[in-house]
Amino acid sequence: MAEMGQTLIELKDTEQAQAIFGQYDCNIRTLEKEFGVSLINRGTELKISGDDHSAALAEKTVHALAEMLEKGEMLTDQAVRYCIQMVREGSERELGALGEDCICITAKGRPLKPRTLGQKRYNDAISKNTVVFGVGPAGTGKTYLAVARAVRAFKDHEVSRIILTRPAVEAGEKLGFLPGDLQTKVDPYLRPLYDALFDMLGAEGFARLQERGSIEVAPLAYMRGRTLDDSFIILDEAQNTSPEQMKMFLTRLGVGSKAVITGDITQIDLPPGRVSGLVQAIKILKKIEDIEICTFTEKDVVRHHLVQEIIKAYEKYHEEGKHYRP
């Protein structure tokens, strides 16, 4: 039977205590549920009761959260849950590195930093390599961070253009069935890229740069026959490219340019029997210098915590040899 005990933590001040406890003590409730302990807070004091092992983990988590606050991090529900994961793995010391890198400042003045170790490795890879593949499930920030890096490179005068593209393939829909001209038809496919740029630059800033030709958002077909010099190029939803499209895109890379290719190989919307250009490229290019492949997992999901559970449930479903039938 596990030994039961109590631990008393004295926090720095009321402001720190309130941030760690969370609104209406929501973080306290999360820690109690995750570790099976009881937490009682009075002022700046926090008493942890439970078996020795669980209480020790909860104590480490509280101290790790305090360190994150010291580095200016916001203790969102996602941040607290990620901290709990890292403590369980014995990796809580690595959390300190997350607050060190500010990728850029958003249009609303918010500093954008990597929120998981997977995001930090991805950010570091983009800094060091000419071509980076970001592969992983939805909600891991693959596209958003790539756009942030592109905006930073543009503002630092490392490139003169930002080019964002994606294949116009989504869940079997065909462009011919959509109303309007070609640009109107492809805009819905490019909306996630527009949204990320609006966050970084503001709607007016984006419109101004797009009018000047400094930013281009276009379907992948528009890239054929071009040489893209001095540009930061992002190919999003790359799992829906054909091998020919992927080769075409990669060979557009010009002097002074950098490319980031993002995708989720579990969400391929190509017709049955068609090979994904992303899957093929990862196999072909994985050993080439100056190309890095970053793989995200459900631990890197920065959306609602249920997204992690959904991803894990689907992975378990497929591991058991079952296949989805619509």
Image: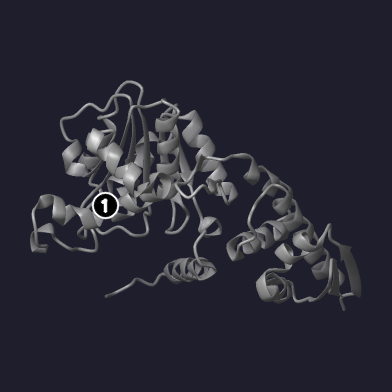
Name the image quarter holding residue 180.
Answer: bottom left
Residue closest to the eye, 46 or 221: 46
| Res. 311 in view | yes
Q: Is residue 278 above or below residue 58?
A: above
For the point 36% across and 42% down, the residue is 261
Q: Residue 181: x, y in percent?
A: 8, 53
Q: Indicate how the structure is coloured in the image.
A: one colour
Side of 61 relative to 203 (left or right): right
Question: Relative to 87, is 151 above or below?
Answer: above
Residue type beneath disc 1:
Leu
Find numbered disc 1 in the image and state the secondary structure of the residue it sits on.
Answer: helix
Residue 106: where, in percent of width, then height? 47, 46
Q: Is residue 169 visible?
A: no
Considering every residue shown, the one lying at the far front of the view is 204
Residue picked out by circle 1: 190
Q: Quadrant of the N terminus?
A: bottom right
Q: Position of residue 299 (x, y in %)?
A: 56, 58
Task: Look at the image and tell me in which quarter the C terminus lies.
Answer: bottom left
x, y percentage for residue 294? 48, 43
Front-most of residues 19 and 261: 19
| Residue drawn at (40%, 37%) of the image | 150
